[in-house]
Image (cartoon, grey):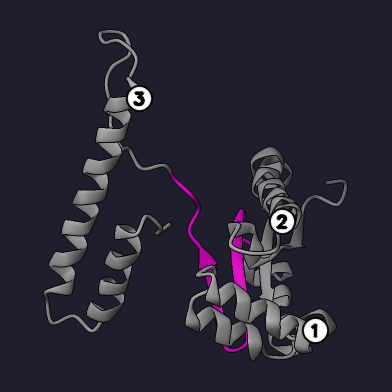
């Protein structure tokens, strides 16, 4: 702040999604992400920007038989899909992640702030900022509170609408049809984020 601005790049993990890593590790990484998203809101006037990188790189912690068994077990339990499992078992070296950090602290990224990036091997991506989707709405001034049964019915109806929309795409000649079918199956078994 005293220097008239700056760039902060924190490190997180895909584990913030809660799919693996126990409970403490994902909670800690979620906190890193929350802090990183709050910094630009609080320090925007001081020209401080902040972003976070979830690296996918081979380190001493992500190699060896114990790690491989752990990843295979997460896949077996349905917590890692095949693509994620292969990526975890065949991660690129850290040199593939470093350019993302260098970009985010450079002037080339002077307008990039409050973002969660992924850097894993030949892949650079960004998580969309979470936004709520409305399951149901009623004006609290004119109606009583929701009942548990009404909330359950609204969630079921939203799920059915989602499946119907996915089926419409899956029935097309889209190259994404197989992925959409997998998504439908995930929603039907109660998963799907």
**Dot 3: within a 10 Å radius of its alpha carbon, few (fewer than 14), some, or many (20 or more) residues?**
few
Question: What residue sits right under mark 3 in the picture?
Answer: 148
Measure how far apart labels 2 and 3 are at the Cα level: 32 Å
**Dot 2: within a 10 Å radius of its alpha carbon, few (fewer than 14), some, or many (20 or more) residues?**
many
Left or right placement of residue 5 versus residue 126 in this view: right
Residue 115 position, x and y percent, is 59, 58
Q: Which quadrant of the figure has residue 165? A: bottom left
**Going from the N terminus, do you reach mark 2 or mark 3 first?**
2
103, 154: nearer the viewer:
154
Measure how far apart labels 1 and 2 are at the Cα level: 18 Å
Q: What numbered label is drawn on residue 29? A: 2
Query: Quick check: marks 1 and 3 in contact, CB under 8 Å?
Result: no
Image point 70% across, 58% down: which residue?
22
Q: Is residue 159 above or below residue 93?
A: above
**Dot 1: within a 10 Å radius of its alpha carbon, few (fewer than 14), some, or many (20 or more) residues?**
few
42, 96: nearer the viewer:
96
Measure how far apart labels 1 and 3 are at the Cα level: 47 Å
Give the magenta range.
110-131
Image point 36% across, 43% down: which residue?
133
* SS class, disc 3: helix
Question: What residue sits right under mark 1 in the picture?
Answer: 59
* SS class, disc 2: helix
163 part of magenta stretch: no
- Give the position of the C terminus as an image quadrant: bottom left
Res 57 seen here:
no
Residue 53 position, x and y percent, is 67, 67
């Amino acid at each position: 702040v005293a220097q008239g601005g700056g760039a902060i790049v924190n490190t997180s993990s895909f584990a913030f999604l809660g799919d693996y890593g126990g409970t403490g590790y994902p909670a800690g990484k979620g906190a890193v992400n929350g802090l990183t998203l709050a910094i630009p809101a609080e320090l925007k006037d001081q020209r401080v920007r902040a972003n976070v990188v979830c690296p996918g790189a081979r380190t001493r912690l992500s190699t060896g038989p114990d790690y491989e068994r752990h990843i295979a077990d997460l896949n077996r339990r349905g917590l890692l899909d095949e693509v994620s499992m292969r990526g975890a078992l065949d991660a690129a070296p850290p040199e593939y992640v470093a350019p993302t950090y260098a970009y985010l602290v450079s002037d080339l990224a002077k307008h990039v702030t409050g973002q969660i990036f992924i850097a894993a091997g030949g892949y650079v991506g960004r998580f969309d900022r979470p936004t709520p989707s409305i399951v149901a709405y009623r004006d609290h001034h004119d109606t009583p509170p929701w009942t548990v049964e009404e909330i359950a019915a609204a969630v079921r109806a939203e799920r059915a609408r989602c499946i119907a929309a996915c089926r419409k795409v899956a029935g097309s000649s889209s190259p994404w049809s197989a992925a959409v079918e997998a998504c439908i199956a995930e929603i039907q078994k109660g998963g799907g984020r």
